[in-house]
Image (spheres, rainbow, N blue to C red):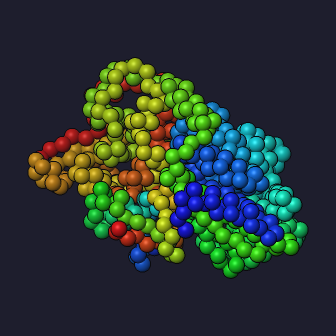
Amino acid sequence: MTVIVNNSKIRIFSGAKVGDVVLRWAVRNRLDISEVSSLQVTDKWGHILDNAAPLRDQQIIKIINR
Amino acid sequence: MKKNFLSIVTLVLVSCFGVHGETVRILSANDMHSAIEKMPQLAAIVDSLRAIDPFMLIMSAGDNRTGNPYNDLYEPVSYPMVSMMNLIGFDASALGNHEYDSNVAGLAKVISLSNFPYLAANISCPPETGIQVRPYKVFDVKGIKVGVLGITQIGENGLPDTHPDNVKGLAFQRPEEVIPQYKWLTEQCDVNVLLTHVGFEVDVELAKQYPYYDLIVSSHTHTQLEGGEIHNGVLITQNGYQLPRVTLTTLEVENGKVVSKKAENIFLNNSNRHSDAAEALLKHFKNSPEMERVVGQMLSDIKGYDALGVMMCDAWLEECNCDIAFENYGGVRYDFFPAGPITVKDILNLDPFMNNPVVMTLTGKELSDMLIACFKADRNRFPVTSGCTAVVTYSDTNKSSIKKLELFDKDGKKLNMKKKYRVVTNNYVASIADSPREDQGVRGDVTTSDLIIHWLEKKGAVDYQGRSSFTEKW
């Protein structure tokens, strides 16, 4: 499935959760895995999502470095 | 709106002694996901609020289970959560997609043990399933009729997000197909609530389509709202994952209509108060004999991460019917395992991350690229494999990069780079190994530790002394 992260598409396995996409995004942006805990994820309205939150195909999320 | 528990109790007291019409209070939780450790705090909060307002309703919007082996591996499954919810006095629960994780028989058992109804208008359960679900329930709160309609989650395939085998025999409808059928109920009730497990975005759409509901108690997306939000006049509440907070919704009702509504978060993490009864239950469940259950025997001492990693990968490979399995080196948490019995707790410590398997179809080349990507993302440690072995040549003694990678199948022949293989790894590796591949795969529902437990139960005894899956050169 595809998730839209900060206006860029990330293709990832079906059933991926927020934490999976954050890891993929972090690796793609050359962040160390240890830095992942400082990232905050929100939905398109700006509500905070946790790493275990489910995602659906074409969902829009935003990742910000706190 | 962030308020501490005492200030909320004060507000509830003030509203109790200064009412026009009646006040209906609903305390709601969502996506508790087996958070049994939080239940003594929740029980204390409920005790205090109910002392002030004995008519307060308590609801869960579903996904009460899945997320803690002390609950999910208990027999009967999920009994710890159900017991705690019974003790606290929940009035109703929606059916989350994870309620189906222990299949139809497991869900029927959970429901039979619950002292509260499960509400879902968009599910049909034939009698032979033994599942008893109501579409709605009307509560009488000081003479006010509170109608609660339940909606369960379904994905694009028309089924809840669980393994399709778990919902065999059940039929589901889309929320928009059934909600209009219950408009008559909203006309008979003073307060109308949708108790849903469909996700915040879908709930916003439901609020647009069905503005005659006063409140949507939302769930599924673990959305952290600051109290609640009004969309098209409908108050929507949802509150994170595994009980960081619960939501107290207050509805003022005059002449059979809701005239004001608000929702506030109550933080469980800030509460030092615990219910003694719930604490005693928690202690009982944390001493579960299931954790000490012997699932297999280790025939000789195992030293080193490699051998235990190979054992884990063998289990995933066989349980997922794959050709090849691999795991990041850092995912193996023991470097020594003594000969003797292997318990459930041992496996949960060996593979403690509650990861799930991801099964993909990869060419030999895609697999090779993925193994190298995993090496890079896992601090330059080559992954452990099953179904193939590797000879890794590094660029230098510091293992800064891989100069050459040769893969061999189980017969010792070079892996065909064009042939497609069914490959399993865990979701962590499938996320960090960012290499080009056509098939990204599918994340399974069981945990990788459950796969190992099930495999060991079948094997009985295993011996992995001295086993390794790769040779290193530089």
The structure residue drawn at horizontal position 19% and vertical position 54%, both measured from the top left corner, is B402
Q: Is residue B299 visible?
A: yes
In the rendering, at what x and y percent does residue B6 appear?
57, 56
Q: Tell me if residue B193 comes above or below residue B382 in the rendering.
A: below
Left or right of B268 on screen, residue B156 = right
The residue that appears at 65% across and 77% down in the rendered structure is: B231
- B236 above or below B362? below
Q: Quadrant of residue B146?
A: bottom right
Looking at this view, is A18 or B126 the one in front? A18
Quarter-of-image position of residue B128: top right
Query: Is residue A11 in sight in this rendering?
Result: no
Q: Which residue is located at x 54 percent, y 52 percent?
A: B268
Q: Position of residue B225 (x, y in %)?
A: 56, 67
Pick the quarter of the image with the N terminus of chain B: bottom right
Total numbered labels placed on residues in the image: 0
In this orientation, which residue lies closer to the viewer: B16 or B385? B16
At 31% from the left edge and 26% from the top edge, which residue is drawn?
Answer: B302
Percent position of residue B468, x then y: 28, 35
Relative horizontal placement of residue B210, taking residue B220 as reference (left or right): right
Give the vertical position of B341 relative to B429 (above or below): above
B322 left or right of B365 in image:
right
Nearest the viewer among B126 and B365 is: B126
Q: Position of residue B429 (x, y in %)?
A: 37, 52
